[in-house]
Amino acid sequence: MLDPRQLRSHLDDYAQALERRGYVLDVARYRSLDERRRELQVRVQELQNERNQRSKGIGKAKAAGEDVQPLLDQVADLGDKLKAADAELMEVQHSLDAWHMEMPNLPDAEVPDGKDEDDNVEVRRWGSPREFDFKPRDHVELGAQGDLLDFEAGSKLAGSRFVVMRGAMARLHRALIQFMLDVQGGEHGYEEVNVPYLVNSDSMRGTGQLPKFESDLFAVAGEHDLYLIPTAEVPVTNLARDSIIEDEQLPLRFVCHSPCFRSEAGSYGKDTRGMIRQHQFEKVELVQLVRPSESEQALEALTGHAESILQRLELPYRVVLLCAGDMGFSAARTYDLEVWLPGQERYREISSCSNFRDFQARRMQARWRNPDTGKPEPLHTLNGSGLAIGRCLVAILENYQEADGRIRLPTALKPYMGNADYL
RNA sequence: GGAGAGGUGGCUGAGCGGUCGAAAGCGGCGGUCUUGAAAACCGUUGAAGGGUAACCCCCUUCCGUGGGUUCGAAUCCCACCCUCUCCGCCA
């Protein structure tokens, strides 16, 4: 959520910045609604004040043993007037609140203009795509050997966009998780957490999935107000919801492995083949809660932590800075890491690292006590995949394949795979 | 699933329907004392919103959430949520 006070006093600037990401703010309507709110609020508060004064007077008169009936007559219609004004205020306030919850975050000034991924800006590359002396196969073909990746079983059990991994493939999948947790938790100092995979709507609102993107989520049927998490970002970031964190506790840095569930209704019709885009996948997520002055730097560090996984796995990748139109709803600045996939002959997203600044924190009332002011203020939140497991698996299969179809194992993973050289 | 207890400020914990935003303690901050620190003592210390360009100041709201009763609700009534204890079941 944007700061309503800032929004009000810099309405035109905000509208302009939001337009960069394709969000059109009806400035005139907003202004008039907000002014209406202000008038009503003043009126309600005046009436409340009057009621309080008179009630106090009645209490005193009664204590003094006086006849309070004349005083009661005076306030007879006050309650109704107040109730009417209050109802009107509530209505206006709710419209404003709902509006605020649907407004995306402001893009950083350095975020390039643009409307989709074609306008993203490449920041740097690491490694170079391997030269094959044979035609590289894609992961679907490679995984079909020995039914190690079984898409038919996945769709029998659940439907399209699900997969079953078997034997060495399942083990490699697990090894990747273990490896990433060890690096991020053990070496980069993130605290490992294990969290609920079902969360309530307050949590979904906190990080920005609700109210606008309900159709991307899987909701649990029945009485419960629960959703399957689309990313560990939701439960982990919401650890700070409704709390005040002391300065010396910051920064908080968490790493969390979890499954992720995404409905992505009307799913673009793209990536229908293979395990690039699944309804269920796993991810090791990095989350940071930091002082506002440190978030910019933290994003660079966090992105570096995600990159280090690709480097250790010796997978070529590039880093792109997302343009305003391609960023997620809650983000102010996002770097995507894109890994080279020989099967597709292009770079594909494997991690997304974002600084949300105070946008999520304001929604979920996550604050820190600023020692300079002594007051609780919204903190800054960041997260990034470190990395997506399924896509990482795909990258390894395709980049490490041999002419005979065998998959060599990256050196960094061997200890997790019984020191074998091949899958 | 059955039975019971309870949700109050950063924390613990009082609170006959009427100056209760709320006693007390802890913690935090400032000060006295001290070479310094500790102890002791004194003072101070919630959040959000509005009136204001801003400070002081003033006002409103907030005692789990949402309704209701009342001139007036932390206190009474209803519904819901959550936590804890015991029993049952269970990985």
Image (spheres, helix red, strand yellow):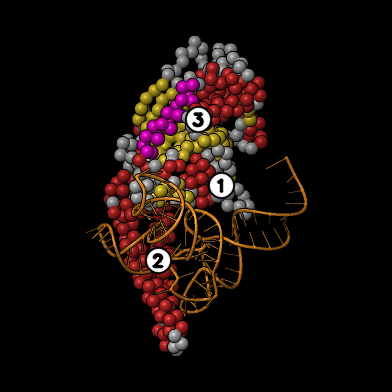
Q: Is residue A309 magenta?
A: yes
Q: CA distance from mark 1 to mark 3?
A: 24 Å
Task: Choose between B82 and A202: the one closer to the eye.
Answer: B82
Q: CA distance from mark 2 to mark 3?
A: 49 Å
Residue B20 spot, x, y in % from top left: 45, 70
Residue that appears at 57% across and 39% down: A194
- Range of magenta residues: A294-312
Mark 1 and mark 3 lie on one chain; the one further toward the N terminus is 3
Question: What predominant SS class does the magenta segment belong to?
Answer: helix
The kind of residue on which mark 1 rests is: Val
Residue A199's label in the rendered image is 1
In the rendered image, the vertical position of residue A349 relative to residue A101, given as above or below: above
Residue A320's label in the rendered image is none
Question: Is A31 left or right of A415, judged from the image as shown?
Answer: left
In front of the other: label 1 or label 3?
A: 3
Residue A263 spot, x, y in % from top left: 54, 41
Circle 1 chain: A
Residue that appears at 60% across and 48% down: A220
Badge 3 is on which residue? A184
Question: Quadrant location of residue A64?
Answer: bottom left
